[in-house]
Image (spheres, rainbow, N blue to C red):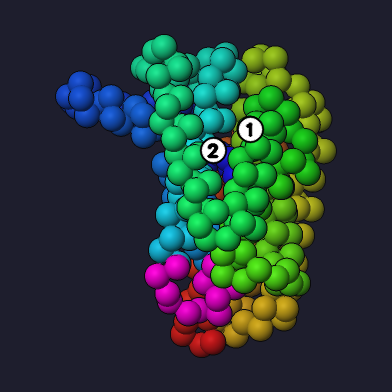
């Protein structure tokens, strides 16, 4: 579940986000929060919440609040763990060397471990309270995320399993049965993941290689790797349309899924034509918050307004 949405600065060196105008106490708090990747964690919690809404057929119950809390805490713990494990690699990369841990804004690094471990344990406890299946999804997702760590290995199936954990947690908290709708939600994530992660790899290809990272797609010619992304954008579009039929959504979802899908395919096609770093970075930015957040929000709105 440790998807990385934290590269939100312009291409180039990524700063830690600290401000000299903050007092020492506030800066320390901000540093610890940044280790947890707050924006990615919030987005993961949001899609897990949406999966629970879909599984519960739009019913608003207090249980949804517990789902939101469980996924948010679990995601923060898992993201913090991958940040901790990747600290030495981050230090070797120009784009990430100014993050909190590689820049030694928190030092020694083990000082963050009580917070990270505490969040993981609390997340697992909440998941167990919701249902043992939710606990298994959380535990498996955290374990796979820690071993996948996209800066160490780019094994695609592992990344998909880790990325689907918030969806599974939200769904299983409301409905302990599998369905084609759940499968397509996971297919959507599986198609989205390369567009999000590999576009960053391509945009900062030389930075990765100079840091000693030479896995796919960094070890592939740009002209070939961008074609792979175009294929995934088409699969993403197809999966979002299939959800309309399987999930029994209305015209609202169909209309906006078409718009969002066409935008993603266009971004992928533009990258194939230009092979430009800036277009790879635009694809990353587009996939991160606008697309993933919007497509899940539309599903919920469709259920609430027209379901």
User: Could you tell me which residue is drawn at 58 percent across and 60 percent down?
Assistant: 131
| Disc ID at residue 159 | none
Residue 3 % position (x, y): 58, 42
User: Could you tell me which residue is drawn at 71 percent across and 47 percent down?
Assistant: 161
Q: Which residue position is annotated with label 1? A: 146
For the C terminus, the quadrant is: bottom right
User: Could you tell me which residue is drawn at 39 percent across and 13 percent down?
Assistant: 107
Q: Is residue 201 magenta?
A: no
* Left or right, residue 220 beside residue 59: right
User: Could you tell me which residue is drawn at 65 percent across and 37 percent down?
Assistant: 143
Q: Are marks 2 and 1 in contact (CB under 8 Å)?
A: yes
Give the mark, 2 or 1, whose residue is nearer the N terminus. 2
> Magenta region: which residues?
52-63
Q: Residues within 10 Å of mark 2 (few under 14, many from 20)?
A: many
Q: Residues within 10 Å of mark 1 (few under 14, many from 20)?
A: many
Does 300 appear above or below 84? below
Q: Is any part of residue 294 visible from this angle?
A: no
| Disc ID at residue 78 | 2
* Left or right, residue 211 beside residue 234: left
Does 91 appear above or below 273? above
Could you say whether the residue bearing mark 1 is in a helix, strand or loop? helix
Residue 151 % position (x, y): 65, 27
Please tell me which residue lies in front, 180 or 135: 135
For the N terminus, the quadrant is: top right
Please tell me which residue lies in front, 136 or 16: 136
Location of residue 37 (image quadrant): top left
């Amino acid at each position: 579940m440790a998807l990385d949405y934290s590269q939100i600065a312009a291409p180039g060196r990524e700063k830690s986000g600290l401000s000299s105008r903050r007092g020492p106490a506030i800066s320390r708090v901000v540093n610890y929060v940044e280790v947890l990747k707050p924006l990615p964690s919030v987005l993961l919690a949001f899609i897990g919440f949406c999966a629970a809404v879909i599984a519960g057929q739009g019913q608003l119950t207090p249980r949804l609040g517990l789902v939101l809390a469980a996924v948010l805490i679990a995601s923060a713990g898992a993201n913090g763990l991958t940040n901790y494990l990747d600290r030495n690699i981050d230090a070797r990369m120009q784009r990430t060397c100014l993050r909190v841990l590689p820049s030694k804004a928190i030092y020694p690094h083990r000082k963050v471990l009580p917070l990270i471990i505490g969040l993981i344990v609390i997340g697992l406890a909440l998941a167990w309270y919701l249902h043992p299946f939710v606990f298994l999804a959380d535990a498996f997702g955290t374990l796979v995320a820690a071993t996948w760590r996209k800066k160490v290995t780019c094994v695609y199936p592992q990344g998909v399993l880790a990325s689907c954990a918030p969806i599974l947690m939200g769904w299983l908290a409301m409905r302990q049965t599998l369905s084609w709708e759940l499968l397509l939600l996971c297919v959507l994530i599986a198609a989205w993941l390369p567009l999000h992660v590999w576009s960053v790899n391509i945009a900062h290809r030389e930075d990765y290689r100079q840091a000693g990272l030479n896995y796919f797609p960094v070890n592939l010619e740009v002209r070939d790797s961008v074609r792979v992304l175009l294929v995934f954008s088409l699969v993403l579009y197809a999966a979002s349309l299939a959800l309309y039929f399987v999930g029994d959504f209305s015209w609202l979802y169909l209309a906006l899924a078409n718009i969002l899908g066409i935008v993603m395919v266009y971004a992928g096609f533009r990258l194939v034509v230009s092979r430009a770093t800036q277009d790879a970075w635009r694809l990353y930015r587009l996939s991160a918050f606008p697309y993933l957040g919007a497509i899940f929000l539309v599903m919920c709105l469709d259920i609430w307004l027209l379901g």
